[in-house]
Structure formats: C-alpha cells, structure tokens
Image (spheres, rainbow, N blue to C red):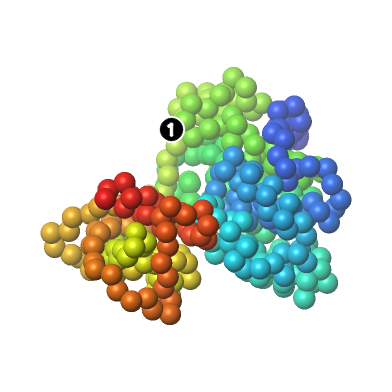
C-alpha cells in the first residue's frame, strides 16, 4: 500500500510538471520504439538540454531504422558532431543493422536480446524496456540514484554501491503505467531533486524523505580516480593550414582526425599548454611547434578558418581555436 502511495504521488506530479521532450511525442508504437532507442543512446553521458537539438536534427534526417542502417558514415558522424563519445553513434548504426537482419526489423522486447545489441548495457536495456515496452522496470540513472539516495538518506560507501541501490529501489514500487513511471522518477531527479539546492517544497514525496527530515542533502559518491596522462602534441603548419592525422593509435577518439600526438610516460619538467578531461582520463598536453612535413596517407591539411566544413571532434576543434588565439 505504501508503495502505491509513493507511485501515485510521483505519477500525479509527473502528469502536471513533465517536460515536453521530442522523444515523448505521441506517435505510433514503431516510432516510439525508434525514438526511445535513439534518445537513450544520445542521453548516455549527455544532458537532456544538450541532446534535444541533436535528436530533432537526427530524426529529421534519419526517420527510421532502415534509413539509419544504410546511412553514409561520414554524414552520420556529422549529425552527431559535438555530442562526443562517438562510439555511441557507430554502435547505434550497428544495432540498427542487427535489428533489421536478426530481429525482423523490430526492436527486441527481451532484456538479454537488447543487451546483445552493440552499445546497449544493463541500464539502456532497462530504460528501453520500461519506456518503449511499458515493462515494470525502474532504470537506475544518475537522476533516479539521487532521488533514492536522498529519500533513504544513503551515505555510507557500502550503501551507495550499485548493487545495494538496485536492491533499495524496490521502495518506489511499480505501476501499470511503467513507461510513465520510469520517466517520472528520472524527471523528479532532473527537475526537483537536483545535485545542489533541491526544490523540496515542490517534491511530491518530501514528507517521508529522510534527507528532508534531517535537513541533510549532501550526497556522497564513490570516489573515482582520474588517471593522469601526459601527451606531446606536434603542430605542423603550412600555408596557414594545420596537419591532422587519422587516429589509429589511441583508444580515445578512434579513427577521428586529431593532431599528431605521443604519450609521455612520467615526463620530467613537463609544462602543459592544455588540459582535457576525457572519461576517467585527465589529459595534460604540451604543444610543440615543428616545421612543415609532407602529408602521409592518413593525414590531411585543414584551414582553421573553415572548421565548419570538416567532420572533427570537439577535442580537435578546441585545439585549433587555442592555436589560433595564441599565435
């Protein structure tokens, strides 16, 4: 009974306050499944407000699985450009091909079948099943985790381990409106139970929230160590153009065009020019200017004044802008 009260309160709040998002539009079941697939890939590691314009442009150009499976790779990357984590879009296209070839053009509705698709793990499979197929699952994203941690005032490292959170989320119960309920919990975390300054006076479940009762909203996180790595980035310039190479050496930004780079192991007297955070890596970059060299088969020259014409990761664009501003 208690579960039902929590569920109804959250759903009632959601019905009034939910955001109008393009992947939530009322449409055919087939389109809803496709929209959910695309949006969940985009929302991995990326905020909703960032995803919205990319999603709209993507769907306008690639309206269905068949188009996606046959879409030109370079154009596909261009549509994704700026979202980062490009392995997502490559896996999305691979998943579309598998769905067409192995699942009769229908998005699978079983957990293990979904997990067999490229780029889909436990969370994304759960999210798709809940949102697209109305299965009674609560996907545990960052927003839902935050609501759960605060509602139960989970602080200790043992309490906030993923396995324990999966067990504890049962307190939220289930609903016959599973699709809406999964999104409602995510929405509650995104709009109300924010990382800092939660809006408790507008929360439908604050009365029984242990953090609200204790007036203790600080969240504890499992500490992840960022690996410090050091790179020497070589700049070759000719006729006001920069030399880029296709990255076949590093695991990050694989097969994208970057400046020639070399990793340095525990360098002495290292003076960095740039710093980037990429996944769990803290990249310290030192720039070295060199005389022009001849192009190789995996390299080409770019004009910094025409950056928009090239399909480049944000990483490379930021370095070009830095070089142009520090000439």
Residue 210 as seen in the image, left or right of residue 93:
left
Residue 114 sits in which quadrant?
bottom right
Residue in view at x 47 percent, y 67 percent: 256
Residue 257 x %, y %: 44, 66
The answer to whether 79 is drawn above or below residue 259 in the figure is above
For the point 72% across and 35% down, the residue is: 20
Question: From what the image shows, is residue 293 above or below residue 11?
Answer: below
Q: Residue 33's quadrant in the figure?
A: bottom right
- Pinpoint residue 314: horizontal percent, then vertical percent: 46, 54
Residue that appears at 52% across and 23% down? 213
198 lies left or right of 139? left
Position of residue 157 relative to residue 242, above or below, is: above
Residue at (37, 61) in percent of width and height: 241
User: In the visual, does 167 lie left or right of 2?
Assistant: left
Q: Mark 1 points at which residue?
A: 218
Residue 179 at x, y percent in the picture: 76, 45
Count the marks: how many?
1
Front residue of 309/116: it is 309
Q: In which quarter of the image is residue 236?
A: bottom left
Residue farthest to the front, as pictured: 239
**10 Å neighbourhood of mark 1: few (<14), some, or many (≥20)?**
some
Quadrant of the frame with the N terminus? top right
Q: Nearer the viewer, residue 240 or 308?
A: 240
Q: Which residue lies furthest to the left in this view?
A: 269
Q: Nearer the viewer, residue 254 or 189?
A: 254
Q: Is residue 31 visible?
A: yes
In the figure, 181 relative to 44: above or below? above
Q: What element carries label 1?
A: loop
Q: Residue 284 in the image: x percent, y percent?
A: 28, 56
């Amino acid at each position: 009974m208690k579960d039902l009260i929590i569920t109804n309160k959250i759903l009632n709040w959601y019905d009034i306050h939910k955001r109008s998002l393009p992947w939530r539009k009322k449409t055919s079941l087939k389109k809803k499944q496709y929209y959910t697939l695309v949006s969940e890939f985009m929302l991995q590691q990326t905020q909703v407000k960032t995803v919205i314009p990319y999603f709209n442009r993507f769907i306008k150009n690639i309206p269905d699985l068949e188009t996606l499976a046959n879409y030109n790779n370079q154009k596909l990357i261009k549509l994704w450009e700026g979202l980062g984590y490009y392995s997502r879009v490559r896996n999305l296209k691979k998943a579309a091909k598998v769905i067409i070839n192995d699942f009769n053009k229908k998005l699978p509705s079983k957990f293990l079948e979904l997990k067999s698709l490229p780029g889909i793990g436990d969370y994304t499979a759960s999210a798709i099943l809940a949102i697209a197929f109305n299965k009674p699952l609560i996907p545990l994203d960052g927003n839902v985790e935050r609501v759960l941690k605060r509602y139960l005032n989970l602080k200790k490292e043992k309490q906030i381990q993923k396995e324990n959170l999966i067990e504890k989320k049962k307190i939220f119960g289930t609903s016959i409106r599973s699709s809406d309920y999964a999104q409602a919990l995510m929405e509650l975390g995104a709009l109300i139970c924010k990382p800092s300054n939660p809006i408790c006076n507008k929360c439908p479940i604050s009365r029984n929230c242990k953090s609200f009762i204790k007036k203790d909203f600080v969240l504890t996180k499992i500490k992840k160590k960022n690996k410090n790595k050091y790179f020497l980035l070589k700049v070759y310039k000719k006729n006001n153009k920069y030399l880029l190479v296709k990255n076949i050496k590093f695991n990050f930004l694989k097969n994208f065009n970057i400046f020639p780079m070399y990793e340095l192991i525990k360098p002495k007297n290292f003076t960095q020019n740039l710093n980037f955070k990429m996944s769990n890596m803290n990249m310290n970059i030192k720039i070295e200017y060199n005389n022009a060299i001849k192009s190789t088969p995996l390299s080409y020259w770019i004009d910094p004044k025409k950056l928009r014409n090239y399909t480049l990761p944000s990483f490379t664009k930021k370095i070009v802008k830095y070089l142009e501003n520090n000439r």
